[in-house]
C-alpha cells in the first residue's frame, strides 16, 4: 500500500492506494467511522454510504462485510449511474436523506463510486449543517487519480457542468485498485488519459515510465497500477498544496487537455460518444500540437505525446471522432467554460514534456483556425 499526504489549509488528509482496501475498510478507516443509532430498539450502529448502483453491485458486499466485523451496518443511499445524479434534484434528495438521519457535523459520509458520486456526496457534505466530513472510496481510475483528491465538489445545472459547487476536502481517500479490475476496458483507457496528463504537465520521468509500462497499467497489472495511481495522486497533491483554491494559476495546470476536451465533450453531448477521459487525451494532443504551431514545443515532443495517447487506445485526431462542428463552433463552446475571465480563456500549453504553462494571451480566432486545419487534415 502507498500513502500520499495531501496538505491543505485544514489539517490535510491521507490518500491510501493499494489492492484490497475496501475489504479492509474497517481497519483503514477506523478513525473516520462515526455512526448513528438506527432508532427504535436496534443496537446496531449505522454508517451512511452513498453509492452508485454499479459500485454497490461490485463492491457493496465487501464494504458491508468489513464494517460488519465490528457491528456496523451500512445505511445505503443508491444513485443511478451517470451524470444525471449530479443535479439540483439529486442534491436535494441526498441532503434531505442525510438530514432525516440526523447526520451531524461530526459524522462522515462515505462515497463509494466514480466521480459523480464523489462530487455529489462531497457537495452535499459541504453544505450539510455548513459542513460535515466525508470519506472517498473511488472505484474508477479517473476518480482515483483525479476527482476524489483535491476537494473540488459540484453538481451540474442547465448552464453547464460543475458550475455550482464548493471546495470541500475529504477526511480520507481509500483508492482500492482491486475495484479497477471490474471496470470496462474503455473506462480504464479513458481514466489513463488523466494519468498520462500528470507526466505531460509536470514530470517527464513519469511520462517516460508510462511509455514503458502504460500497457501494464491499462490492463490492471500490479505493481504498475498502484505505482501509477500513487504517482498521479502525489503529483496532484503537490499542486493542490500549492494552490488549493486555484487562485495562482498553479492548480489550473491540471486542466491540461480540458479546454479543448470540454468543447469536444459539449459538441458530442457529454456522453458515451466521447468519454471525459477520451476528450482529455485528445485535448492534450491538440494542446501539444497547438503549442508546436505557436513555436513553443518541439514537434518531436508533440509526436511522443500523441504516440503515448494512441498506444493507450485513445483517439488522437479530430476526424477520428465523427465531429460535426467547425473550429468556430468549438471555440464558441469554449466560451462557456467556467475558466473564461475578462473575455479571454487561459489555455494550458507546453514548452516541453513535463513543462506546462498557462497562456492567457491566446486569441480564440487562432484556436478556431487551428481546429479548422486539424479537422481538414492535420498539417504535420
Ligand atoms: N480536476 C482538476 C482539479 O482538481 O483541479
Image (cartoon, helix red, strand yellow):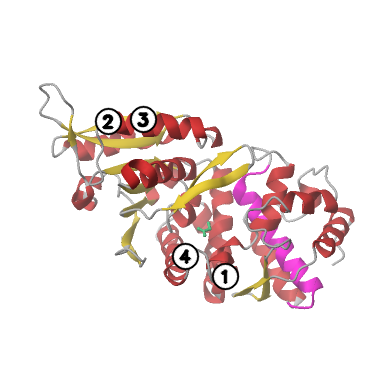
Q: Are circles 1 and 2 on residues that touch, CB within 8 Å?
A: no
Say whether residue 310 is visible. no
Say which of marks 1 and 2 sits in front.
1
Q: Which residue is mark 4?
A: 236
Q: Are circles 2 and 3 on residues that touch, CB within 8 Å?
A: no
Q: Are circles 3 and 4 on residues that touch, CB within 8 Å?
A: no
Residue 80 in the image, given as x and y percentages of width and height: 48, 29
Mark 3: few, some, or many residues within 10 Å (few <14, many ≥20)?
Answer: few
In-front residue for pair 232/306: 232
Q: CA distance from mark 4 to mark 2?
A: 32 Å
Q: Is residue 81 above or below residue 145?
A: above
- Assign a secondary structure to mark 4: helix
Say which of marks 3 and 4 sits in front.
3
Quarter holding the C terminus is bottom right
- Assign a secondary structure to mark 3: helix
In-front residue for pair 303/338: 338
Say which of marks 2 and 3 sits in front.
3
* Residue stretch in magenta: 274-296
Q: Which residue is mark 1?
A: 249
Mark number for residue 75? 2
Q: CA distance from mark 1 to mark 3?
A: 36 Å
Q: Would residue 295 be counted in the magenta stretch?
A: yes
Residue 225 in the image, given as x and y percentages of width and height: 44, 58
In the image: residue 374, left or right of residue 281? right
In the image: residue 326, left or right of residue 131? right
Amino acid at each position: 500500500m502507498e500513502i500520499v499526504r495531501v496538505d491543505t489549509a485544514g489539517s490535510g488528509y491521507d490518500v491510501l492506494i493499494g489492492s484490497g482496501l475496501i475489504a479492509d475498510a474497517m481497519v483503514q478507516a477506523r478513525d473516520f467511522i462515526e455512526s448513528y443509532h438506527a432508532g427504535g430498539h436496534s443496537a446496531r450502529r449505522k454508517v451512511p454510504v452513498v453509492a452508485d448502483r454499479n459500485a454497490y453491485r461490485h463492491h457493496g458486499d465487501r464494504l458491508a462485510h468489513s464494517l460488519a466485523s465490528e457491528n456496523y451496518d451500512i445505511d445505503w443511499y443508491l444513485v443511478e449511474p451517470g451524470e444525471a445524479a449530479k443535479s439540483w434534484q439529486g442534491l436535494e434528495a441526498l441532503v434531505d436523506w442525510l438530514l432525516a438521519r440526523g447526520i451531524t457535523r461530526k459524522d462522515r459520509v462515505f462515497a463509494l463510486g466514480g466521480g459523480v458520486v464523489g462530487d455529489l456526496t462531497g457537495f452535499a457534505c459541504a453544505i450539510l449543517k455548513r459542513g460535515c466530513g466525508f470519506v472517498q472510496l473511488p472505484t474508477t481510475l479517473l476518480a482515483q487519480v483525479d476527482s476524489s483528491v483535491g476537494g473540488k465538489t459540484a453538481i451540474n445545472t442547465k448552464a453547464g457542468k460543475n458550475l455550482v459547487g464548493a471546495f470541500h476536502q475529504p477526511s480520507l481517500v481509500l483508492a482500492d485498485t482491486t475495484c479497477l479490475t471490474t471496470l470496462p476496458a474503455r473506462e480504464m483507457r479513458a481514466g489513463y488519459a488523466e494519468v498520462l496528463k500528470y507526466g505531460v504537465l509536470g514530470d517527464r520521468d513519469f511520462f517516460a515510465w508510462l511509455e514503458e509500462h502504460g500497457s501494464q497499467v491499462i490492463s490492471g497489472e500490479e505493481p504498475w497500477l498502484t505505482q501509477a495511481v500513487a504517482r498521479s495522486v502525489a503529483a496532484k497533491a503537490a499542486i493542490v498544496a500549492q494552490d488549493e483554491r486555484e487562485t495562482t494559476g498553479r492548480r489550473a495546470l491540471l486542466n491540461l487537455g480540458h479546454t479543448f476536451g470540454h468543447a469536444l465533450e459539449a459538441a458530442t453531448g457529454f456522453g458515451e460518444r466521447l468519454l471525459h477521459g477520451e476528450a482529455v487525451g485528445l485535448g492534450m494532443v491538440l494542446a501539444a500540437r497547438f503549442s508546436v504551431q505557436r513555436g513553443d514545443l518541439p514537434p518531436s515532443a508533440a509526436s511522443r505525446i500523441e504516440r503515448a495517447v494512441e498506444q493507450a487506445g485513445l483517439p488522437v485526431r479530430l476526424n477520428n471522432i465523427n465531429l460535426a462542428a467547425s473550429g468556430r463552433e468549438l471555440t464558441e463552446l469554449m466560451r462557456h467554460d467556467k475558466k473564461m475571465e475578462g473575455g479571454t480563456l487561459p489555455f494550458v500549453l507546453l514548452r516541453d514534456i513535463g513543462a506546462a504553462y498557462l497562456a492567457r494571451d491566446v486569441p480564440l480566432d487562432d484556436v478556431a483556425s487551428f481546429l479548422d486545419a486539424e479537422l481538414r487534415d492535420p498539417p504535420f
